[in-house]
Image (cartoon, helix red, strand yellow):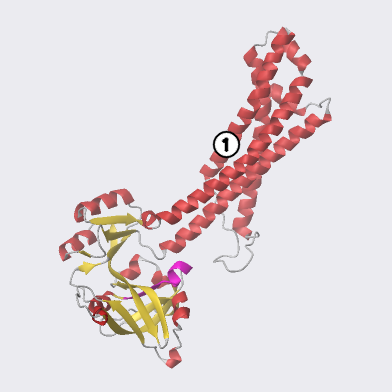
Amino acid sequence: MYLNFAWRYFRAKKSTHAINIIAWVTTGVIAFATCCQILVLSVFNGFEDLVKSLYSSFYADMKIVPANGKTFVLTPQKITELSSNTSVDYLSLIVEEKALIQNGESQTILQLKGVDHNYKYVCGISANIKKGKYDLGNAENPFLIVGAGLQNAAGISMNEALGPERLAVILPKTNNSSNDPLETLSEGIISPSGVFSIQQDFDNAYAITNIDFVKQQMGMRDNTFSAAEIKLKPAVNDKDTKAALTKILGDRFIIKNRYEQNSNLYNTMKTEKWAIYLVLTLILIIAAFNMISALSMLVLEKKQDIAILNSMGATFGQIRNIFLAEGLLLGIIGTVIGIILAATISLLQIHFKFIKIEGGSFLVDYFPVKAIATDYLLVTFTSLVIVVIASWIPSIKAARHKSTLA
């Protein structure tokens, strides 16, 4: 009944043309704000997926690090227990340390990762080799895979016709108490075999070689590592796996999932997403003021109708609900139009990528979009809540106006 009255009021010609204009402007602003909110959330989802895919090419599903210090001891028995866990697909042992790479007169500081033969299954670096090949060599004949940024910084040539360059890698020695600074450093010779390109943060900072070479140069004891990285089997539960691995290792280790390895990044992205969402919600609040104006003017125009309804026995709540339904109708129409527009634009962007990113320095040249049903539900809920709150004031005024005419 209430929506029937609301629909009649919405379609009827008003004595004051401004009421029609304000009503349609209100509907348009709601549609615009709803469309913008959904599109912005969808673009943030697209960028979040893009960043996650880039970071997942470098970071493992899980990483084991020492609770204290830079290294830990992992016995062969513990390694076997970890590898044989039903959720673990591959386990890679890591030794990571800052190093200085010297190529002629050029010197560059980098983060050197010594990895075992399972590393190419744990992360996606082997699939992101842009020059050369994935070859780490061995302790006697080591090879180095460098990030594209490091290659440029160190002036490393990958010209096969000239043969592999010979680079000096300087690393700190462990368990060395000498007072001579030179005695605390080791220098090894290594040749580049490949260049990877994933993301600027990694390309500018990391290089990878075999673990035996790094441990030999640093004088590390057997079974001593900096970290262990794990690739999980498909569709396993992170929390259950983490609990099972913690039971094996004890409290001297910290186990981080992919999110925990990049918590600052993911938290920043979420904060930015919801900050923009709140800013766009202000547009809906502005539309709410238009709605209050439109409904207030409608109440004044329908004084006679209110009196007639009152004489027919309409209660305070019924009069209120009629005008509340009128506001809700405006909100529903605006929200539906906004959702349809947002869905249409999103689908066109996904298939045709017609909205481009200017500059040409990004990983993609278009705005990535990912539509999530919960975003649509959230925006719809937000819009309708604001509409109901905005409609409440004039609907109460209409109901009270009824009592003065009685």
Relative image position of residue 229 (x, y in whole percent)? 30, 63
What residue is at 67 percent from the left and 30 percent from the top?
329
Q: Quadrant of residue 282?
A: top right
Residue 117 x %, y %: 29, 73
Q: Residue furthest front?
A: 179
Magenta region includes residue 39: no
Image quarter in which the N terminus is found: top right
Nearer to us in this view, 24 or 151: 151
- Give the x, y percent position of residue 162: 44, 92
What secondary structure is found at the residue carrying circle 1? helix
Which residue occupies 42% across, 55% down? 264
Percent across and percent down for residue 130 are: 46, 76
Stretch of the chain drawn in magenta: 200-209
Residue drawn at x 71%, y 35% as measured from the top left: 26
166 over 36 or under it: above or below = below
Residue identifier under label 1: 382
What residue sits 57% from the left and 53% below the top? 43
Q: Is residue 86 visible?
A: no
Would residue 201 be counted in the magenta stretch? yes
Residue 173 lies in what quarter of the image? bottom left
Locate residue 387: give its quadrant: top right
Count of marks, rendered view: 1
The quarter of the image holding the C terminus is top right
Left or right relative to 162: residue 291: right
Q: Between 291 and 135, which is closer to the camera in this rendering?
A: 291
Drawn side of residue 327 relative to residue 66, left or right: right
Check the image and report above or below for 213 versus 225. below
Vertical comparison of 113 with 16: above or below: below
**Outermost residue toward the bottom in this view:** 162
Q: Is residue 277 left or right of residue 173?
A: right
Question: Residue flagged by tag 1: what amino acid is it?
Answer: Thr
